[in-house]
Amino acid sequence: MLQYWTAILTEATIFAVLALGIDMIWGWAGDFDLSAYAYFALGVYMTIVLTIGKPHPPVSYVLGLHLFYPVAVVLAVVVVVAFASIIGAIALRSLREVYFSITTLGAVWAIYYWVENYTPLFNGYNGVYGLFDPLGGGMSYSAYHYYFFAACLVILAGVYVVVTRLSKSPFGRMVRAVRDDEAAASVYGRNVFWAKYRTYLFGAGLAGFSGALFAAYIGAFNPLDWRPTEIFVLYAAILVGGRGNPKGVILGSFIVYVGFVELTRYIPSPQARPELGPALRQILIGVLIILMLKFRPSGLIPERLGTDGTQVRRTWRTLFSRSARSVDEIDVDNSVASESEVDA
Amino acid sequence: MGIAVAAILALSAVAFTLEYAVSRVVNLAHGEVLTIGAYSAYVGETNFHLNIYVCALVATVFGALTAMGLNLFLIERFRDQKPLSTLIATLGASLILQNLLLIGFGGASVSYGFAQGSLLHVGPFLWTTLTIRVIVSAIVVAGMIYVFLQRTKIGKALRAVAQNRSLAQVSGIPARSVVMRTWATAGAVSGFAGFLYGETIGTITPSIGNGFLLLSITAAVGGGLGRPYATLGGALVLGLVMSIAGTYWSSAYQLVIAFGFLVLMLLIKPNGMFVRGRAQMVRA
């Protein structure tokens, strides 16, 4: 039982890091990015191929180095950010909102099918495997998992501190100002593209980093078990916790991820119908996304900004107050403005 | 990617763009409407032994019902929200529908048992009667859409609502009902396209809508989102590009090529190749 909980909470911790990355792009900059899966997966792939050594036929993949795990993590993040700089430059240059989202959606599926079919890259749909005990401590299987969970918690705490500081910094406020009113922010001398682009690279980097952690956790990755839809649970988690608020995002990740795993554990999955459990889980995620968007789009702990741009101190009371929907009302004004632009 | 798939793509993309035109929503559950059309025809054929024409009709009806349900229970309820919120909501709807199909029919692929038809030589090409049937029916449906948009009162009302819903409403056009009927039309076309697609590729799985959604989006955005004729042009150009590319690369890279096409279009002319003028920034 203890091992079971350790496993679930480790996954939730890693996914919380990923959710923080997605939330920087979606919550702070307001760009709904669907290609986060690609950055996560690339982080996993790069970490594995940089640490497991040369491929043995018929398995084939690029690089095949035997690096020390932390070095591999750094390199993986660098590759992910370099890759995101291409996608981001295309998607953010002259596209916003819906156009941005569908471009990233196209990107993630194009990359997905390419990786699945082009075996010399990451061994196609069979995937890559073979990473275990990356720091080489020679621990037993269960002890390793306990230490790894502890390490993940420490890393999450570190990421949380960095992200919160960044969120409260002039940069964090500037990105939100750009999100709320691009024209006004650019009149005040902010470079809109550069603000969004940097946020995008940060977010993608975090997603790649969480992928590198995940690689050390499961040690194997293939496109059939990990389809892009697998991380939609995190979009639900961010909505539940509160977009643009690191605390809320972490809370949401734990509530939603652990909640879903626990809820769907008791759904019978008969031998003849192995797809039943996962399918019901995906349906619940879809329902949760729609209900949150409709009834509480700003989440359990909403992001709330004071009139002077500083973050207002929140209390637990906001969890239950109706005024939490105020962020929403601002959004309605924006939609009127953007509709008139389309007609022009 | 054969010419038959290009014809089906044209139908699917026009339906997608009509939905956007009246509701300003990028419907990510569009692929599932096609899939539902394909599966309802499958049920009609295997469980009720209907003939091919009745099956096509069943697919059309179920496609229309699904799209109307989406509009009634989702799109209309999100009218007061940003288009981006509606997009995310349709993503949720797509997850729900796709997994309901997975529960109902399982993940294994199924196929129709209709006669595949014989081979024909027309001009320099080798055709099957199936391909010809698909192409002819796609052209007929495209013609019907044209008549519907240009010659009927509801089509005129549709174009008015697409331009400005509130203005249409105060001019005495029942905007709500026009939007609903547009969704019904788009759903019917999608359901029919799904049936044709299932017949052409021969295998139906709950996730066939996924790839087709992306192709439809690419065609619509490449041609001009929300503009039926521009979208039709976009679909034909995309079909041509993919046919040419398909002779050099494996069809497994279809979506990669389509995405390359989308990126190229977005960089050259982000508001669509058949739309006059050039937008500095497109946000929808």
Image (spheres, coloured by chain):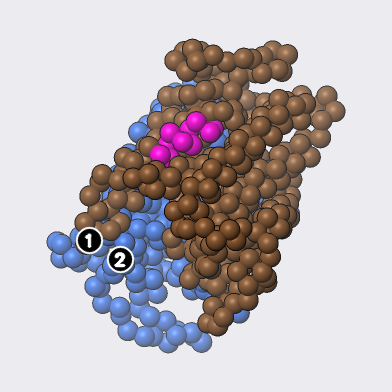
Chain colours: A brown, B blue
Q: Would residue B51 be visible to someone looking at this image? A: yes
Left or right of A171, for residue B174: left
Q: Residue at x 31, y 61 (%)?
A: B107
User: Which residue is the site of mark 1?
Assistant: A271
Q: Which residues, given as a range, are shown in magenta?
A: A249-258
Q: Residue B83 is drawn in which quadrant?
A: top right
Q: CA distance from mark 2 to mark 1?
A: 15 Å
Q: Please, what is the three-letter code of the amino acid marked with disc 2?
A: Ala
In the rendered view, tell whether residue B26 sits above or below residue A166. Answer: below
Nearer-the-camera pick, A202 or A216:
A216
User: Which residue is the site of mark 2?
Assistant: B108
- Residue A251: x and y, percent? 50, 31
Nearer-the-camera pick, B32 or A292:
A292
Nearer-the-camera pick, B75 or B55:
B75
Disc number placed over residue A100 in the picture, else none: none
Nearer-the-camera pick, A78 or A333:
A78
